[in-house]
Image: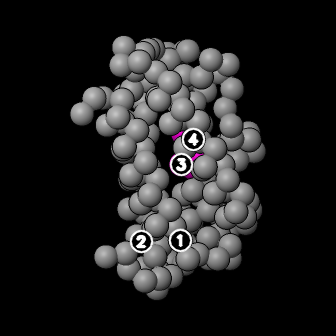
Amino acid sequence: MRTKEAILGTLKDARGWLDAWSAGFTDREAHSSHGAHVNPLAWQLGHVASTQDDVIRLFSKTGRGVVPEPLKKLCGNGCPAPTARTRFPPLKTLRRHLARTHSTLARLVAASTDKGLDRKPRTENPYFHSLGQAAYEIALHEMYHVGALGALRRAWRKPSMG
């Protein structure tokens, strides 16, 4: 299997798990951790979208992302921890942002040659050194947050995924 196809498969698999494990929550449930020691579902989804947007900004031709700044300030890297007063967008909005980041990342990778996967970011970044490495690691990051969704599913007594 070639590198590009492997990365695209990893992105697709990670999103499939995120979609499956985040299904069945209401907006009210998504805004609370319900006693679990992880951030609420709405934060998890907003964070995944925000960090994927960071990769898009680093590797797109324009340097522009697809996630609005207010969401990045609420859920992005380095943002303050959410509190009971934090107001998140509805799940429908968060899922729309996730769909945009996923499709944009997949297009960036799909349009790249194998050599292009070694392309450096627009600006130096301590985490991401090439497009291929960034796309792969951001998919792994998404899977990390799927683990947090398992804790939320337990806290809300949602059906187990396996």
Quadrant assignment, res 150: bottom left
Q: Quadrant of the N terminus?
A: top left
Quadrant assignment, res 58: top right
Q: Is residue 51 magenta?
A: yes
Q: Quadrant of the C terminus?
A: bottom left
First in sequence: mark 2 or mark 3? 3
First in sequence: mark 3 or mark 4? 3
First in sequence: mark 1 or mark 4? 1
Residue extent of the magenta highlight: 47-52
Q: Which residue is mark 4?
A: 103
- Residue 86: tell me if it is visible: no
Q: Which residue is mark 1?
A: 23
Eye-nearest disc, 3 or 1: 1
First in sequence: mark 2 or mark 4? 4
Q: Amino acid at mark 2?
A: Ala
Compared across the picture, whether 36 is left or right of 9 comes to right
Compared across the picture, whether 105 is left or right of 151 comes to right
Q: Are marks 2 and 3 in contact (CB under 8 Å)?
A: no
Q: Marks 2 and 3, how far apart in space?
A: 17 Å
Q: Marks 1 and 4, how far apart in space?
A: 19 Å
First in sequence: mark 3 or mark 1? 1
In terms of secondary structure, what is the magenta stretch mainly? helix
Quadrant assignment, res 40: bottom right
Q: How many marks?
A: 4
Q: Marks 2 and 4, how far apart in space?
A: 27 Å
The residue carrying pointer 2 sits among few (fewer than 14), some (14 to 19) or many (20 or more) residues within 10 Å by Cα, namely some
Q: Amino acid at mark 1?
A: Ala
Q: Which residue is mark 2?
A: 151
104 or 66: nearer the viewer: 104
Which element is circle 1 on?
Answer: loop
Eye-nearest disc, 2 or 3: 3
